[in-house]
Amino acid sequence: MISATQSGAAVVLLSGGMDSTVCAALAARKHHSAALHISYGQRTERREREAFLAICHRLGIGNRLVVRNEALQFIGGSALTDDKIAVPESRHLGRDIPVTYVPFRNAHFLAAAVSWAEVLGASKVYIGAVEQDSSGYPDCRAVYYQAFNRVIEAGTRQGGIEIVAPLIAMRKAEIVRLGLELEAPFDLTWSCYSREDRACGVCDSCVLRLRAFQEAGASDPLPYAPIAQTV
């Protein structure tokens, strides 16, 4: 068991997915944490918000903020925000950045988190971005967060706020193992891109998650649609 030693204040971006939940569990052990959830008109908006609230309750994070960003839905260009663009099955994806990429989404999220961190006097902003097993999203790379930290230093009142991406270089299976060690509430999370009742098991996010649990030698507690038998 990882021991809990809290210091300072931190804002954690918590979507309700597997990675952000492990990140939140880690932040909650190290800091007095406040959790930020941003809805942006994604297909599973209601289910992700439900997951966020339940995860915060389980982790004992009382300071919560739910924000709605309408710009990303109006801008469109992603299968997650535009009903006219289908969410592809993982096996149909090529090597290009997939249509599930939401253009420059994490910049919107980080901007809100840094603004709140300034108000709260927090010195850290945690985000559960993963580069190794991501879908190739450009805003999930370590270099992106290094650059964003320079923007924060230049553009905030006093500086001193740092984006922390503790999972960035980890494989998904490693994240599952860390989450189990932290007792992260995987049973409350939601990762599916397309459904809110049972996870589809065939979108890229579901497939990566299922594979991670298999490689970690653990059982995924989420309910999946009957089609999700293999990954």
Image (cartoon, rainbow, N blue to C red):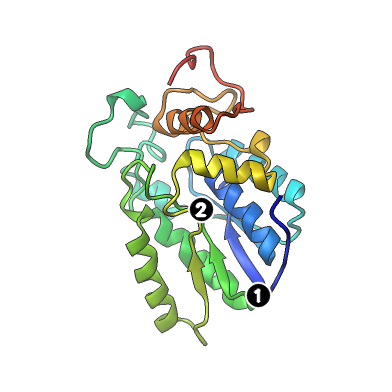
Q: Are marks 2 and 1 in contact (CB under 8 Å)?
A: no
The residue that label 2 is drawn on is: 128
10 Å crowding of disc 1: few (<14), some (14-19), many (20+): few
Q: Is residue 31 left or right of residue 146?
A: right
What residue is rendered at 39% in x and 48% in y?
74
Residue 231: mark: none
Of residues 59 and 84, which is closer to you in this image? 59
**Quarter of the picture holding the C terminus:** top left
Spatial separation of the CA atoms under disc 2 and disc 1: 21 Å
Mark 2 or 1, closer to the camera: 2
What residue is rendered at 62% in x and 74% in y?
122
Q: Is residue 67 left or right of residue 208?
A: right
What residue is rendered at 52% in x and 70% in y?
114
- Quadrant location of residue 85? top left
The residue that label 1 is drawn on is: 120
Q: Position of residue 157 (x, y in %)?
A: 51, 86
Q: Is residue 89 left or right of residue 195?
A: left
Q: Position of residue 57 (x, y in %)?
A: 76, 48
Q: Amino acid at mark 2?
A: Gly
Q: Position of residue 26 (x, y in %)?
A: 63, 56
What residue is rendered at 67% in x and 34% in y?
187
Q: Amino acid at mark 1?
A: Leu
Residue 160 appears anywhere in the view? yes
Q: Position of residue 227 (x, y in %)?
A: 48, 13
- Quadrant location of residue 123? bottom right
Of residues 184 and 4, which is closer to you in this image? 4
Identify the secondary structure beneath mark 1: helix
Sequence-wise, the earlier of marks 2 and 1 is: 1
Q: Vertically, is 178 above or below 62?
A: above
Q: Vertically, is 213 above or below 38?
A: above
Residue 64 appears anywhere in the view? no
Identify the secondary structure beneath mark 2: loop
